[in-house]
Amino acid sequence: MTQRMRGLQAWLLLLVLVALPAARAQAPLELGPRSTDAALSPHVSYRHDATLSDRPEDAWRHVAEGDFAPLPDGKDAFGFQRGAFWFHATVVNRNPGETRWLLVQEYPLSDRLDLYLRYPDGRTQHFAGGDHLPFHARSISYRHPNFQVDLPPGQPVEVLLRVESESSMQVPLHLYTPAAFTEISRDAQLAIGLYYGILLALFFYNLVLWISLRDASYFWYLCHITAFGLVLFTLNGLGFEYLWPDSPWMADHMVPISICLALIAMLQFARTFLELSHRAPRLNLGTIALIGFFVLFGIASVWLPYRLSTPVASRAVLLGVLWILFTTIQVVRQGYAPAKLLLLAWSMFLLGTAVFTLLAFGMLPKNFATEYGVQIGSALEMLLLSIALGYRYAQLRNENQRITNEANQQLERKVAQRTQEVRHALVQLEEAHERLRDSSRRDALTGLYNRSYFHEGFDALLSEARDARRPLSLLMVDLDHFKSINDRHGHLVGDDCLRWAAQRIGRVLRRHDALLARFGGEEFVVVLPGHDLASAVAVAEELRQALVSEPCVSQDLRLRISASIGVHTIVADADSDMDDALQTADRALYAAKANGRDCVRTSISAA
């Protein structure tokens, strides 16, 4: 009979709770016979105690009077708020096999939590939690605050939770059976472990590169990984669990301090990677000013109240990343190719950071994408940054491997041919001597004759022309705006352009029995035996048109190459030497450049 009376009392209490003002009350949470976990937030009503004046008995009275309201739009995130929040819900357990449940607040940074349970017989229980208590005070050693609660089958139990925090007010509440909590926590820890495993792998990989190359960008990248890893370690509650479990002060102040350290490393890395000191001096000064601000704010966070420093630091993350994005875009517009990969990396990070910040201020609902947005964005960002930094290292490694392989192949061929080499030693020495002699005449980049051989060849051709009483013409060819190609696209593209131009010029001169040499830089010199001034100008014009008729293709670029050409003809009875002829042709070349480039000028027109 007594058991029936208790059951009747329980149902009467439940009916009374349901009969409270309909506009304010929330439906009880019914845990089904096979339930193992359930979200409590959809069944929660709340009240904001902005003055911190309510005691538990006041809160129970407000519950009875219907002063608690449903969560706004069902969201359990309120942003940074003063005062305390009271949350109320009623739970009915219909699972007779599970009476011990774990109530978890799935946000690790709340300062103080007080949980009150009221049973149908009037009995109440009180639990305390949050990171203002030592970590070992938690029911289960886990990064999220949690409480073990008794939920007798079939009895409505009222849950009253008071949360006071200077951090973001986020109260996602969830009930788990011990077995369900073990499974969900295992999966969460695995995901976090994978993230930090990625960070550690990137850290040690780039540490090796920094030790090998001593590049400052690698050093600041390592600082960025370390500092941002500390930020997430703190925000995920792992810092309180593993690093400072008995220090509520550290649990509070490490949030803004670690954020400032991460921003300092991020800004300094971007400043070094983008070479702002000479590419964008004004942006460089702005970046240094931001670094100085975060240094000072990080120091001030040691003394500033947590409720002031944390919101400022959270907003500063967006400010810092937006500044890096703006700076990177400006450098990309200057044609610095590596900045494009950096821009993509920071875009990923900005997206994840924006999601996290909007969640902290209660503007986005809490789900997997918003809760782990920073981890996802930062993992992609750090992977992309590591690829950008490691590109040069990979190129050097591949080149060394190629050289080693070629050396091994040459050694094998030499061993196989040793008997034949001994037999034909004299022949091979002669051939080697000839190749060396020819190599000394050639320009290594273009394969054309070099300047020293040109002097020898010119003297011989000049002597022959005078003996045969024939004219000898000299062409000075200079590629237009070549320095801008090197500055904008790099010297590798510039080398491709020089080789392309040499091939085009050589193709035109093939039928003229000419002497072609690279005179230096982007300048070529041509000697045309037997050509008077008119025929030499015709050849020069043919050269000029051959260069501009088709673009030079290099690394997916199509570049228009033109040339200015100076022409000088030495008549048979002229008393001039090579230096005079070169000087005269050079004046004609400068006249071509002065007349707009991409044209031909003669020594007569230059005079």
Image (cartoon, helix red, strand yellow):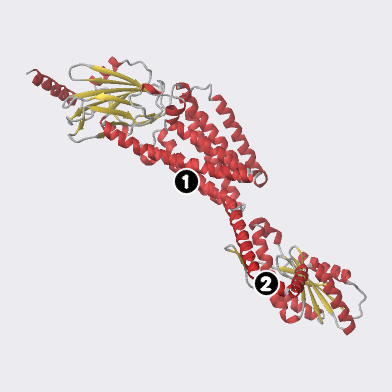
- Name the secondary structure under disc 2: helix
Q: Amino acid at mark 2?
A: Thr
Query: Which tag, 1 or 2, sits closer to the chain's start?
Result: 1
Quarter of the image for the N terminus: give it: top left
Q: Is residue 241 visible?
A: yes
Residue at which label 2 appears: 419
Q: Is residue 343 left or right of residue 494?
A: left
In the rendered structure, which amino acid carries the disc numbered 1?
Leu
Q: Is residue 64 left or right of residue 293?
A: left
Q: Observer-nearest residue: 459 or 86?
A: 459
Which residue is painted at 53% across and 21% down in the image? 303
Q: Residues within 10 Å of mark 2 (few under 14, many from 20)?
A: few
Q: Nearer the viewer, residue 47 or 374?
A: 374
Q: Which residue is mark 1?
A: 380
**Alpha carbon distance from label 1 to label 2:** 58 Å
- Point out residue 601 in the picture as x, y percentages from the top left corner: 79, 72
In this view, the mark in front (1 or 2):
2
Instruction: Report which quarter residue 358 is drawn in.
Output: top left
Q: Secondary structure at mark 1?
A: helix
Above or below, 530 relative to 180: below
Which residue is most to the right? 575
Q: Residue at x 55, y 48 (%)?
A: 342
Q: Horizontally, is 591 left or right of 328 in the view? A: right
